[in-house]
Image (tube, rainbow, N blue to C red):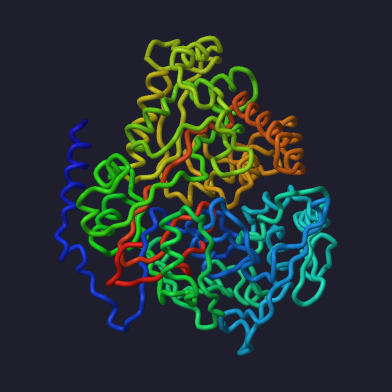
Amino acid sequence: MSRRDFLRTTGACAALELPLGQAFARAKPTDGKKVFRWAFPVAETGFDPVQISDLYSNYVVSNIIEPPLEHDYLARPTELRPRVAEALPEISADFRTFTVRIRRGIYFEDDPAFKGARRELVAADFVHTLKRVADPRWKSPNWAAIESSGILGLGEMRKAASGGAKFDYDRELEGIRTLDRYTFQVKLATPSPRFAENLADTRLFGGMAREVVEAYGDELMSKPVGTGPFRLAEWTRSSRIVLERSPTYRGDPFDAHPPADDVRGQEIVARLKGKKMPMIDRVEISIISEAQPRWLSFLSGEQDIIAVPLEFINVAVPNGHPSPALARRGIVFERTLQPDVVLTLFNLEDPVIGGYTPEKVALRRAISLGYNIDEEIRLIRRNSMTRAQSPVPPFTSGYNPDFVSEMGEFDRARARALLDIYGYTDRNGDGWRETPEGKPLELVMATESTQIDRAFNEMWKRQLDALGLRVSFQVSQWPEHLKAARAGKLMMWVLGYTASGSDSDSFLGLAASSNIGTSNFARFHNAAYDKLFDQQRQLPDGKERDAVIDEMKRIWVAYMPYKIHGHRFVNDLSHPRVIGYRRHPFARDFFKFLDIDDDASPA
């Protein structure tokens, strides 16, 4: 163990032993309100569902703006159920027509955009939102999820607007239209057996009023107005977000259906079933990017829940159990495997790392083979990640636990041999390889400035040094890297993707050429892959679709547009005052399911 690791670990041990009086010194709100406090490790981007794609902004938006469906909070395996819809959608036998009926009597929070009127949620609000996803004005990163669904007429409407024509929201399309005040219908050009999952995604089908969009325009990222249980009360960008209970929310009762053998899930239902939601009055979110202050903030009671930072896993939950210091305080622990992937993107349009010629492919495959994932898992992830073999994460369709590929392999000798064979050699004797043309070769990796990012940078440098590849690091904030990645201006970047539903399509879409400029940050283009991508979308879940997906995985390995690292575990801790907290694989709207009781025992 290095001196730095020793100091970090002993400091964490000391922090765990905070006196109980100090740990719970935070005063209760004098107004008697129930306040839930949480810290984001990265900054939000904004709160217009159409314009966001990041996880943390979605946590906020999903508690304000509602889609037709939602995930049962405690059901495992996960289940879709109505949220503002009357029932699950009516689906045609050919999986091309989806009809959704919205509940009557659901109202938006009061807002000046409504000019004093009480505004009811109607079917047209969902049609308008989906058209906004297609409107080039909003540059929606979520368009890729809709484009390949083939909603009749929507792609043509977007193409015309991209060419300078007006995007006409009043134009009726066969593919997305209202049938009456409370019913809308989606029609697709090709079958899509899993399309209904989109109806639970606020970023695609969040019910927003046209009046709000027209009133606030470019200010929508700071003006979310919805029918959900909370409304935005305060926002200081990259610092503080406050939500408060919406006085116009309808107050649905708590209802969830955990498996019979889920002891903790059954305990949550026993305590909360039938209670009017939301049960808390206020949510206060801080942005704390550095792990140590975020961890200390949780230990001191300033935050109610935390996903244990990697640096503190060994002392907080050694051997997969909470430490005695945490257990004495009644802190609740749950460890869950996530439906996510950590990956390194390689920009295939970059002159150094990109391209499809054998030597360019060899460079990317050598980097992949020469990177020791097990070392990352052991030393930095603290065994809170499992090695991945493909881009398809656990709990999603197409995940095959028996699939094994070079993606999960570490072979430094083979990596060096690949570089030698394809002409990446050290011609001038300075210890670094040059390109096959004899030009200097330097890899540039986007990164952030946190302590954990620096640890990852050190590991990457050590791994690439061992291959004779020089690397430098481009430091900026995550939102800036996101913009640059979409524009094709990053060479390499490590990031994570988390599933919003049980369909693996969005992960497979990371390499679809139709998604270049949106989710395909690698800017990968392969006709065979695109054909398979379209094919799997039209197939129902089963062996035939799984075989197509396995072939797509092999194309990833062959061209290596991304190096897939692993699937992460999350080690969640919550103070006993928080009743009902449980991480859902896909849902982000969990605030309404929580209660706060300062005198409570763990649950």
Q: Is residue 156 visible?
A: no
**152 sits left or right of 47 in the view:** right
The quadrant where residue 220 appears: bottom right
The quadrant where residue 173 appears: bottom right
Furthest residue in direction front, as rendered: 260
10 in relation to 429, above or below: below
The quadrant where residue 389 appears: top right
Q: How many marks?
A: 0
**349 sits left or right of 434 in the view:** right
- Placement of the C terminus among the 4 image quadrants: bottom left
Tell me which residue sits at (46%, 54%) in the image.
262
Which is nearer the eye, 527 or 122?
A: 122
Residue 140 pos. (x, y %)? 64, 56
- Placement of the N terminus among the 4 image quadrants: top left
Tell me which residue sits at (43%, 47%) in the image.
336
66 in relation to 58, above or below: below
Which is nearer the eye, 34 or 158?
A: 34
Residue 514 pos. (x, y %)? 71, 42
Residue 468 pos. (x, y %)? 41, 18
Q: Is residue 435 visible?
A: yes
**50 sits left or right of 480 in the view:** right
**142 sits left or right of 260 in the view:** right
Residue 205 pos. (x, y %)? 66, 63
